[in-house]
Image (cartoon, rainbow, N blue to C red):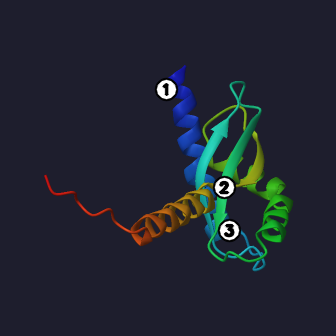
Amino acid sequence: MADRHNRIKALIARNVSEIVMFELKNKSIGMVSVNDVEVYDDFSQANVYVTFMDTHNQKRRLEELERTEGYVRSSLAKKMDTYKVPRIKFKLDESYFKAKSLEEALEREEKQLESLPKEEEQDN
């Protein structure tokens, strides 16, 4: 069962990525990267985590992408060899931004540590 679940997950990720990149005609969405897919155990819904290459207006772009769910699902049904095609729920993948802010915080902390006066070694 786990193999089937992973196969469906990979199939959805690849096909949704191709559909979004090559079939959607909505220019306001822009370039989209499909980063991950979570599929419910009963295959009723798939959460597709996306990142937009252009970082401004991400919420509006996500809303535009959500409006294409019907088209994406019907196109996905034509490409998949399964009986049941899950509903698609697009979600903004914020892991890149979280990692970036964590990296920036670590850099600030490192600079603060470097700026502290170093203790002089004591002579023995």
Q: Is residue 1 above or below residue 56?
A: above
Residue 46: x and y in percent read: 71, 41
Judge from the rendering whether residue 57 lies leftward or rightward of residue 111; answer left or right.
right
Residue 63: x and y in percent read: 85, 64
Question: Label 3 sits on what residue type?
Answer: Glu
Q: Residue at x 54, y 27 (%)?
A: 4
SS at mark 2? loop
| Camera-side mark, 1 or 2 | 2
Q: Residue at x 75, y 80 (%)?
A: 27
| Camera-side mark, 3 or 1 | 1
Q: Of marks 1 and 2, which one's residue comes earlier in the chain? A: 1
Residue 50: x and y in percent read: 66, 58
Q: Is residue 59 above or below residue 13?
A: below
Q: Residues within 10 Å of mark 2 (few under 14, many from 20)?
A: some
Q: CA distance from mark 1 to mark 2?
A: 25 Å
Question: Label 2 sits on what residue type?
Answer: Asp
Judge from the rendering whether residue 54 lies leftward or rightward of residue 58; answer left or right.
left
Q: Of marks 3 and 1, which one's residue comes earlier in the chain? A: 1
Q: Of marks 3 and 2, which one's residue comes earlier in the chain? A: 3
SS at mark 3? helix
Which residue bears the numbered disc 2?
93
SS at mark 1? helix
